[in-house]
Image (cartoon, helix red, strand yellow):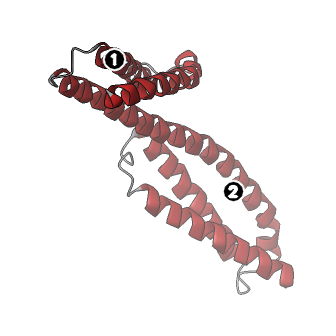
């Protein structure tokens, strides 16, 4: 009886987790993507299996036939979880890629706007300011390239492997740009 109650509680907790996770996913801005819809579908199916398992484990449904079905239901649930996890990974990858692309686009825009503003300043033609503007432009181009690499139609394994290096290059350029920005401000 204690084992049955513990298994029923576990199945109930799993079913609740599936339901809460599904609700949360539907509030995300990317919830309508094909990848997220597939993940949500697998989440629903797996949640239904957890609910069915919970019902089978209830004290008033427990009989020899039901008890014999439980191992198969657990196996089915575990199999569905494996499939669901593949789609969860794909869904997370899509969400992270979209967030990184949005961040790169914002950075590229910031660089372009800042460069335009700097060129209108009276000190825009000084050697120090020109160096800063040059680094600002280079860094902005790296942010733009990063945004392009993160676009869904460019994303492939090779591109994905290049992204960490590109991001590191961008950060390195930002450090150099900040040195020149400080020098420009001191002028």
Image spot of residue 64 (x, y percent) = 83, 75
Say whether residue 167 is left or right of residue 8: left
Left or right position of 142 against 167: left
Q: Is residue 63 above or below residue 170?
A: below
Count neighbours of disc 2 (C-alpha within 10 A) and say few if under 14, some if 14 to 19, many if 20 or more: some
Residue appearing at x 70%, y 48% in the figure: 79
User: Mark 2 falls on what kind of element?
Assistant: helix
User: Disc 1 to disc 2, how far (Cα)?
Assistant: 65 Å
Question: Quick one: label 1 or label 2, which is nearer the N terminus?
Answer: 2
Residue 47 in the image, given as x and y percentages of width and height: 58, 62
Q: Residue at x 85, y 78 (%)?
A: 3
Eyeballing the image, is 15 above or below 141?
below
Picture residue at 42% right of the left edge, 39% below the top: 99
Residue located beneath label 2 in the image: 77
Q: Residue at x 38, y 41 (%)?
A: 33
**Is residue 112 or residue 87 the one in the foreground?**
112
Decide: few, some or many residues near mark 1? Use Cα within 10 Å; few <14, some 14-19, many ≥20: some
**Among the 4 quarters of the image, the one containing residue 150:** top left
Q: Which mark is residue 178?
A: none
Left or right: 101 in relation to 75? left
Residue in the foreground of this view, choosing between 161 and 136: 136
Between label 1 and label 2, give the one nearer the viewer.
Answer: 1
In the rendered image, is residue 104 in sight? yes
State the residue position of label 1: 128
Secondary structure of the residue carrying tag 1 is helix
* Quadrant where the image shows the C terminus: top left
């Amino acid at each position: 009886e204690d084992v049955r109650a513990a298994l029923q509680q576990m199945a109930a907790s799993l079913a609740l987790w599936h339901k809460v996770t599904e609700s949360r996913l539907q509030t995300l801005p990317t919830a309508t993507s094909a990848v997220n819809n597939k993940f949500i579908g697998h989440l629903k199916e797996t949640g239904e299996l957890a609910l069915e398992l919970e019902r089978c484990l209830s004290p008033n449904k427990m009989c020899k036939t039901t008890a014999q079905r439980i191992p198969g239901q657990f196996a089915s649930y575990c199999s569905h979880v494996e499939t669901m996890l593949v789609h969860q990974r794909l869904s997370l990858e899509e969400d992270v890629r979209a967030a990184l692309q949005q961040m790169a686009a914002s950075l590229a825009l910031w660089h372009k706007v800042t460069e335009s503003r700097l060129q209108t300043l009276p000190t825009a033609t000084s050697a120090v300011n020109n160096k800063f503007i040059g680094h600002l432009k280079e860094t902005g181009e790296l942010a733009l390239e990063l945004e392009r690499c993160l676009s869904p139609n460019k994303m492939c394994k090779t591109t994905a492997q290049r992204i960490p290096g590109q991001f590191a290059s961008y950060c390195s350029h930002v450090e150099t740009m900040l040195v020149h920005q400080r020098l420009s401000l001191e002028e």
